[in-house]
Amino acid sequence: MSTPLLSAKNLRAFYGPTQILYDLNFDMQKGGITTLLGANGAGKTTTLRALSGMVKTGGEIRFDGKLISSKDTADIVRLGVAHVPEGRGTFVRQTVEENLQLGGITQPAGQIASDIDLVFTYFPRLKERFRQQAGTLSGGEQQMLAIGRALMLRPKVMLLDEPSFGLAPLIVQEMFSILRRLNEKEKVSMFLVEQNASLALELADHAYLLETGRVVMSGPAKELSQDENIRRAYLGY
Amino acid sequence: MEQVVQQIIGGLATGAIYACIALSIVMIYQAIDHLNFAQGEMAMFSTYIAWQLMQWGMPYWGAFFITIAISFVLGYVIERAVFKPVHNAPVLSHIVIFIALFAIINSMAGFIWEFTIKPFPTPFGTKSVLGEGLLSAHGAGMIAVTGIMLGFLYLFFRYTRVGLAMRAASANPDSARLVGIRVGFMNALGWGMAAAIGAVAGIMIAPVVFLEPNMMVTILLYGFAGAVVGGLTSPGGAVFGGFAVGVIENLASFVPHFGAEMKLSIALALIILVLTLKPNGLFGRKIVNRV
């Protein structure tokens, strides 16, 4: 097997003196979609925050062969890691246009206009809202903007924190089909944290199950979705 | 009536200076969430640098622009050297540092240049330009210089990528990091710019109040008033607040038995009034912290 795009070895994370993650080990392959499942408080968001250097960590995180565990968030992002945070992290007072420009702020100025056009092909709605303040967008539109903004980075991997959160079922379906297209056409690898386990397992090729800060199960997404315990605890049938 | 107009125009001239100081206060407030008490002293020190350069024979505008550049660097260095290490310290630590900076810069200026009052040149002359004693040439120059500077700042923040990055870093630091913006660096840039704006204010007001280490103390108070009136979260509001305080202060000298002696109380009364009625200032927005 080739070297993984993103891997964690004995990853630990702390909020102050409280340890949240206990020796997590996982890899994800280039071009793949990996999902991290788990109940509320299992440490899913913290794992993403650890990957992008937003919490104090121990252990090793490697991205594209480079050790990134002690780097600053901005430097990790510049390597091509686009984190779409919980709550979307929209710049609410800035316009949609400015939000997209900010997504590409580390990129050469010459490619911004064409990259914005690319975002429009996936999210035509954003074009209609182009000059509007981002705070006035609906929840679904803000989620589109958050993913569009991440795309502006021309990322190698997207870290997606609950992209379905607070959205109507139809919009969630649309969002996930767009994510699949982004993965296939733009070759963006994805690391997906999701409460909606059935959706996540449908999209992902590989899955890890997190319980109270520990990986308790992992394998191909298809296998996990057949697993008796996962079905009962997370899929509800 | 003519007198009222005269006072309003005179108020705009000093208001321009208050606006500069208010703006530099707001810029640093946006970066680190605290009021920089040493802002006035930084401006005073910059003014001394300009004076020194002119003493060495440099022409006025050469000294003006070099001082702005030096002030920018000094502001940047103060942030990196003093405030970056205490970034996560409690508010009280910041306040103590501000007071220390105030005292250090103040006595350093006195030590280097002595506490005697020095005259400061104006490039605009002192003749009246608008009617008899309505507006001095220097007053008009102050308004013009401030206007040009504010115009450039507006263009910078509105149309450049660095300006956009600075706005993003102050509006939402966490999200800014997630798009790759180095927030600490942006904060330091903000300090540098605030120091440069303060330098302009100091150089412009020095011919009016004369150059001495305590020249900015009352002006800083008016600057605070302007910033609070406009709202600490709104750079445009701070500029408006600065001009408003200048005009109101000048008009107050009309009130019988109140006069010039009570001018300073006006600024303080304004701070209290605005904080009571509109705690976020006229143009400020409420900061809601998500839990």
Image: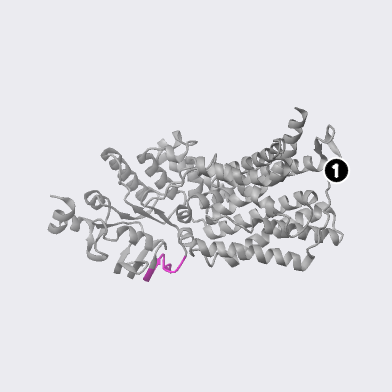
Report the side of B215 relative to A1 (left or right). Answer: right
Residue at x-position 41% and y-position 50%: B289
Quarter of the figure with the N terminus of chain A? bottom left
Judging from the image, mark 1 belongs to the subunit labelled B
- Is A65 a magenta residue? yes
Q: Main secondary structure of the magenta part?
A: strand
State the SS at label 1.
loop
Residue at x-position 55% and y-position 65%: B84
Establish if B143 lies above or below B74: above
Which quadrant would residue A227 be assigned to in this image? bottom left
* Residue B126 percent location from the top left of the image: 85, 43
The amino acid type of the residue labelled 1 equals Thr
Report the side of B247 relative to A4 (left or right). Answer: right
Residue, far front:
B257
Residue nearer the viewer, A188 or B227: B227
Report the side of A123 relative to B163 (left or right). Answer: left
The span shown in magenta is: A57-71
Question: Is residue B239 in sight in this rendering?
Answer: yes
Q: Mark 1 points at which residue?
A: B126
Residue at x-position 74% and y-position 60%: B213
Question: Is residue A4 in sight in this rendering?
Answer: no
Residue nearer the viewer, B88 or A214: B88
* Residue A193 percent location from the top left of the image: 30, 55
Which quadrant would residue A8 be assigned to in this image? bottom left
